[in-house]
Image (cartoon, rainbow, N blue to C red):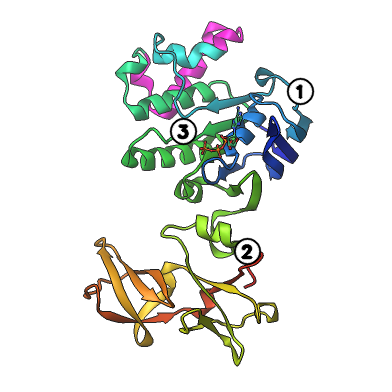
Amino acid sequence: MAGVDFVDVRKSFGAFPVIKGVDIGIEDGEFVILVGPSGCGKSTLLRMLAGLENITAGEIRIGGRVVNALPPKERDIAMVFQNYALYPHMTVADNMAFSLMLGGAAKAEIDKRVNAAAGILGLSKLLDRYPRQLSGGQRQRVAMGRAIVRDPQVFLFDEPLSNLDAKLRVAMRSEIKELHQRLKTTTVYVTHDQIEAMTMADKIVVMHDGIVEQIGAPLELYDRPANLFVAGFIGSPAMNMIHGRLDPDAPGRFLANDGTALPVASPPAAARGRDLVYGLRPEYMTLADDGLPAEVVIIEPTGYETQMIVRLGGTDVTCIFRERVNVRPGEVVRLSIDAGHVHLFDVETGRRLF
Ligand code: ATP
């Protein structure tokens, strides 16, 4: 096993820069997820780590060793692709054994490793089948089995769950996480799905337009997003964002652009006189008789909780309540805001001030 470091890594396709100076440190045994919207460069970064794409500038290290010039097969990594890339004319066992056979391993050793991986992944009874005789989830497991048998220093996953239906995706999420807890192999995993990132990662790298916006543990990013991009990307439903400024006469109050006064705990002096975004997650509002009036736009009970969109501060604001709420669109509810969980962002820089 080994850690991975990206040091000021850059990549251009022709004159077009797609990775613009990325630094990421991944510790031995860590499960790190690169997440970000389509086109932000996460697959390119993974492909550079795998050796499938060359590096325009900077350094990539695996286990402390610079691998910039090493061909893929000398990097001791195994990659699981989105489309699984299974050989259709080979059985499950042969698919899993293939890279070991190419490497010249002895038959007994290959069988041992394939059987062990099949046991871990619940594939023992399917070893003689062909890929076309498997479900999507089983194919996904074979693709992982192929990576496991090689016992690499690092696993790379490129959107491995995107071809599965929603239910299977949730099940496979737990399987991959369990697998990591068991094998503890350093893992770098790419997805555009922030829920996948939140639920599986030890550490998330949020990317946007070829740069790293923030690196941190899932709940760190959720509770202390560095800027508006991360605040809007992490969390579902997304953080509510209301534009306005601090009240010059009462700095403990935020005045939305429509004049609504909203509570803030103790904003820093740097926030005064600036155009701000008031950031409030949907779960930090409760219904209270002395709360702020807000008109209900949509109400969506899920059974477990009630999600509601209301009009507040000139903005459509999403709230989530643990209780069942008996109101209709057009009615007015009263909301109490947990001021201790309010964030303020500077509109000009996008940075979180508070
Ligand atoms: P997605 O989630 O859609 O796969 P991504 O974040 O993985 O997106 P990349 O595939 O890394 O993004 O692409 C980053 C940028 O690089 C995109 O603008 C893409 O168009 C560009 N790009 C990727 N590969 C090439 C290539 N071979 N030639 C030119 N441009 C490329």
- Vertically, is 3 above or below 91? below
Q: Which residue is mark 3?
A: 160
> Mark 1 or mark 3, which is nearer the start of the sequence?
1
Q: Which residue is mark 2?
A: 350
Ligand 1 rendered quadrant = top right
> In this view of the protein, can residue 30 be seen by the observer?
yes
What's the residue at 34%, 68% (across, down)? 309
Q: CA distance from mark 1 to mark 2?
A: 38 Å
In the image, 213 versus 285, the foreground residue is 213
- The part of the chain drawn in magenta is 100-127
Sort mark 3 into few (<14), some (14-19) or many (20+) by Cα contacts within 10 Å: many
Rendered location of residue 236, percent (x, y): 43, 57
Tell me the tag on residue 69.
1
The amino acid on which the numbered mark 1 sits, given as a three-letter code, is Ala
- Vertically, is 264 above or below 348? below
Tell me the tag on residue 269.
none
Instruction: Give the structural element (helix, strand or loop) at label 3.
Output: loop
In the image, 300 versus 4, the foreground residue is 300
Q: On the rendered structure, is 340 left or right of 273?
A: left
Sort mark 1 into few (<14), some (14-19) or many (20+) by Cα contacts within 10 Å: few
Rendered location of residue 36, percent (x, y): 54, 46
Q: CA distance from mark 2 to mark 3?
A: 32 Å
The amino acid on which the numbered mark 3 sits, given as a three-letter code, is Pro
**Quarter of the image with the C terminus in it:** bottom right
Magenta portion: prevailing SS class: helix
The amino acid on which the numbered mark 2 sits, given as a three-letter code, is Gly
